[in-house]
Image: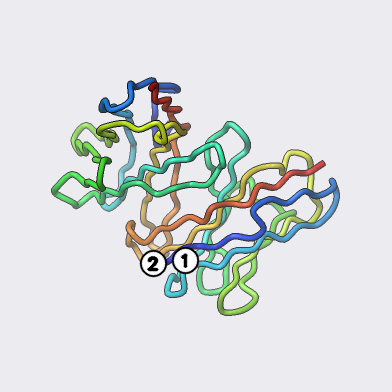
Amino acid sequence: AQKITQTQPGMFVQEKEAVTLDCTYDTSDQSYGLFWYKQPSSGEMIFLIYQGSYDEQNATEGRYSLNFQKARKSANLVISASQLGDSAMYFCAMREGSQGGYQKVTFGIGTKLQVIP
Amino acid sequence: EPEVTQTPSHQVTQMGQEVILRCVPISNHLYFYWYRQILGQKVEFLVSFYNNEISEKSEIFDDQFSVERPDGSNFTLKIRSTKLEDSAMYFCASSELNRGYGYTFGSGTRLTVV
């Protein structure tokens, strides 16, 4: 079973509009964390936002917010006021702890976002 | 803002050659990782490293791969005899113990095997 599911291979949004990128996850751990990364065409992985499983409030970072619904195991990324520079691939990812202390991160397949002027 | 540094940003190598990808993790981090992303595919875990030994490795991380922390700052991934299918983006990451906010990726090394 997929641990991270991103069901939108591609999305379009008008500049200055808001967009929601979907992500659902599967884990039996009580302690875990969810990330969103942006990957522009240049290839680097840019951290956007993080939500811990015990965080009671939804994470926000500037124009990015994470809509965390724990019971539904979803962690959607909301980008407000889209800009042309937001056009990129977006990955949802999850860290799960281990008794050894290290944390492996599992990535989804990504959503390609294109912002239209 | 502390960052994970990877060098080189792009490396081209001939099939069968050995390559070493270098990473400088964040200085107070204890756990180090390598991930791989074949073009157009998702990012895949390769290996985690703690206290000078491998904590976990994926099935991708076969005998052709090795990792090392040769000094107090560098963390390297060696591919012994490169194959065409090793062409990918390789990301290094480091983390503190159980802190998601501290989990940081480098900007990647694009390896092209010709």
* Residue wearing tag 1: B31
Q: What residue is drawn where x is 55% and y is 57%? A: B92
Tell me if I can see residue B57 in this picture: no
B56 left or right, relative to A102: right
The reply to whether callout 1 and callout 2 are in contact (CB within 8 Å) is: yes
* Residue wearing tag 2: B96
Between residues B18 and A2, which one lies in front from this camera angle?
B18
Q: What residue is drawn where x is 74% and y is 44%? A: B112
Residue A17, percent across and down? 26, 25
The amino acid at mark 2 is: Glu
Disc 1: CA contacts within 10 A as few (<14), some (14-19) or many (>=20): many
Work out which residue is located at the far left of the displayed protein and give it. Answer: A56
Q: Quadrant of the C terminus of chain B?
A: top right
Disc 2: CA contacts within 10 A as few (<14), some (14-19) or many (>=20): some
* Chain bearing mark 2: B
Residue A57, percent across and down? 14, 47
The amino acid at mark 1 is: Tyr
